[in-house]
Image (spheres, grey):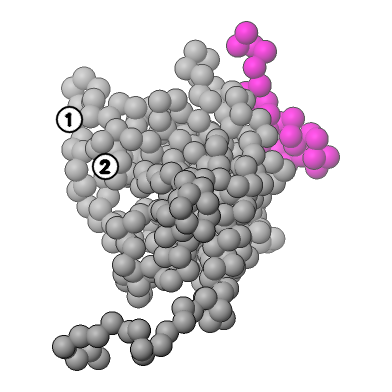
Amino acid sequence: MPYRRTTLSKFIIEDQRRSGAPEPDLTSLLNDIQTACKLIALATSRGSIAPAGEPREPAVATAVNVQGEQQKPLDVTANNIMIGTCEWGGQLAGMVSEEMEQPYEIPAAYPRGRYLLVFDPLDGSSNIDVNMPVGTIFSVLRCPGGVTEPTLEHFLQPGTAQVAAGYAIYGPTAMLVLTLGAGVHGFTLDPEIGAFTLTHPGMAIPPDSHEFAVNVSNERFWEPPVRRYVDECVEGASGVRGVDFNMRWIASMVAEVHRILIRGGLFMYPRDSKDPSKPGRLRLMYEANPMAMVVEQAGGAASTGRGRILEVTPEAIHQRVPVILGSRGEVERLVRYHADYDAGADQPFKTPLFNARSLFRTA
């Protein structure tokens, strides 16, 4: 029966009681975040349908955001929803969003709080036109003591400092997945009562998997350890791994991580040479860090290939990093391949006697 279900609001309150040090402001903030996610879920579910008398928003991108990426109307809508829902309650000292170049200041009309909110309002928005899953990613940090008007440097905290993190996914059903630092739990939006209800308690990632997700179109730009790993997976049962792998790619980090939480696997957007000015594709503070916290709390691992993501010290709010996360055994294998490569231990034996010859000179 609906009244017997554990709603997200009830779960948060009970978790705070169990902790022995309840934080009412954090409870209120998480409730505001879930309200924002409900509103974004509604906006995304309407697609190209507009309320009567209102013009239909174009599905195509109409602007370029601070990241230099095409911005869809729903990106802006989701960003405005998150800000408008969370700015007034008195729990926040400031916010950072993928869609804004600088931190967002809480208006003077509202009280300031002890927390900082960092978020990607609509991850995977390139999938909107083809009706595939998109989502919202969020991270909660503590504002340094005594600071009521945080500046950029106050947001630059490593992922280990996160108080809470999670994401909402808007697919056939809307779900919100949350960690408060003691496990990961999934809540499904029940349209009958308008509440997220606990449906996936204690989510856990299998330590090993035979599934991986990577954008193979970037293969020519990958580092050798990444090529080595993918080649071994593609070789399947006839290769060194001795087992066949499946490959997935949705182009939505929320969807990729959600699949990993449900059935295991590995997702990566590794370092490549496509754009030397960008050491990675995904943003550290509002994509990599919250997802790394979720994955680690579910028993998985998250690495740049050369270090734990949560231990990276941010240097800018829109900083990019390589991301490799998922089943612990697969992540550790890739980390080992990076270490072998950096140490020169995986270099193939070469001899001029068997080199390929050509009539043309090569540099």
Image quadrant where one finds the C terminus: bottom left
Residue displayed at 42% across by 84% down: 350
Residue designated by label 2:
73
Residue 286: x and y, percent?
Answer: 49, 54
1 vs 2, front mark: 2
Residue displayed at 62% across by 53% down: 329
- Which amino acid does the dot numbered 2 rest on? Pro
Residue 261: x and y, percent?
Answer: 56, 40
Residue 255 magenta-highlighted: no
Residue designated by label 1:
55
The answer, for residue 83, to whether it is visible in the render is: no
Number of residues whose C-alpha sits closer than 10 Å to that of mark 2, classed few (under 14), some (14–19) or many (20 or more): some
Using the image as rendered, state which of residue 111 and residue 191 is in the foreground.
191
- Secondary structure mostly seen in the magenta stretch: helix
Number of residues whose C-alpha sits closer than 10 Å to that of mark 1, classed few (under 14), some (14–19) or many (20 or more): few
The picture quadrant where one finds residue 27 is top right
Give, as a single range, the part of the protein colored magenta.
Answer: 1-27
Residue 176: x and y, percent?
Answer: 53, 34
Determine whether, in the image, residue 266 is placed left or right of residue 298.
left
